[in-house]
Image: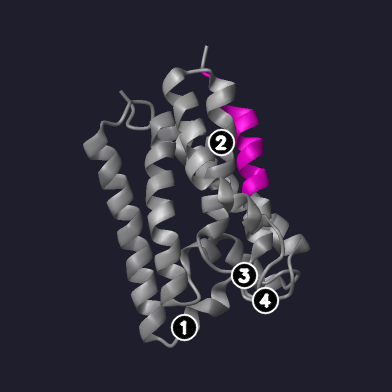
Amino acid sequence: MNVLTKKLDTKQQIKWIVVLLAVLTVIEVINFLSGRTLNQLGNIPRYVPGLKGIILGPFIHGSLQHFFSNIAPLAIFTYLMLQYGLKRYLIVSIWIILLSGILVWLFGRSASHVGASGVIYGYFGYLVLAGFLNKSIKLLLISLLVAFFYGGLIFGIMPSGPFVSWESHLFGFITGLIAAKLWAKPNR
């Protein structure tokens, strides 16, 4: 059986999360020790060299506070996304990173957009809608719990501070909803 199609047990899901957080931590340490020089690799709208930030931006954070504020929700949402299976998790993650990154590059403010929050908002959008579309009791319960405990995230899609990429939040959320519409229904 292919590793992408088999169901991961809790131990395997935790391993995926640990690896993801380890990669982000290594990147954060390098960025911190280099005086935040990696921030120039962020998504810089309408600037051709900034296109690399579509892929790299979600892995880079602007400060330690930014990094730590993203770690817990990313870990929780990754675990919940893995309840849909590894293949779905990977497809939805790639979709959110690419499409939200492209939309930020096209329509975002001129700044270096960095951080995993766009991915977090994408997972949020997916998790809230997908359980209702899938109609599995377990996944519906996940949707309800995410909406209840993280519903306040919705306010992050509106303009707030000058150093907050609300565009990443907005486009991440929208691409997560689209991903739920495309892939949340159970396979026949």
Label of residue 36 in the image: 1
Disc 3/disc 4 C-alpha distance (Å) = 6 Å
Q: Is residue 185 magenta?
A: yes
Residue 85 appears anywhere in the view: no
4 or 2: tag closer to the N-terminus: 2
For the residue pair 115 and 152, the one nearer the viewer reads as 152
Q: Residues within 10 Å of mark 1 (few under 14, many from 20)?
A: some
Disc 4/disc 2 C-alpha distance (Å) = 28 Å
Q: Residues within 10 Å of mark 3 (few under 14, many from 20)?
A: some
Q: What secondary structure is marked by label 4?
A: loop
Residue 1 appears anywhere in the view: yes
Magenta stretch, main secondary structure, is helix
Residue at mark 3: 164
Disc 1/disc 3 C-alpha distance (Å) = 17 Å
Query: Are the residues tagged 3 and 4 within 8 Å (C-beta)?
Result: yes
Q: Amino acid at mark 4?
A: Pro
Residue 73, horizontal then vertical, whole percent: 43, 53
1 or 3: tag closer to the N-terminus: 1
Disc 1/disc 4 C-alpha distance (Å) = 18 Å
Residue at mark 2: 128
Residue 165 picture quarter: bottom right
Query: Are the residues tagged 1 and 4 within 8 Å (C-beta)?
Result: no
Label of residue 162 in the image: 4
Residue occupying image coordinates x 27% and y 44%: 14
Q: Residues within 10 Å of mark 4 (few under 14, many from 20)?
A: few
Disc 1/disc 2 C-alpha distance (Å) = 34 Å
Left or right, residue 164 beside residue 12: right
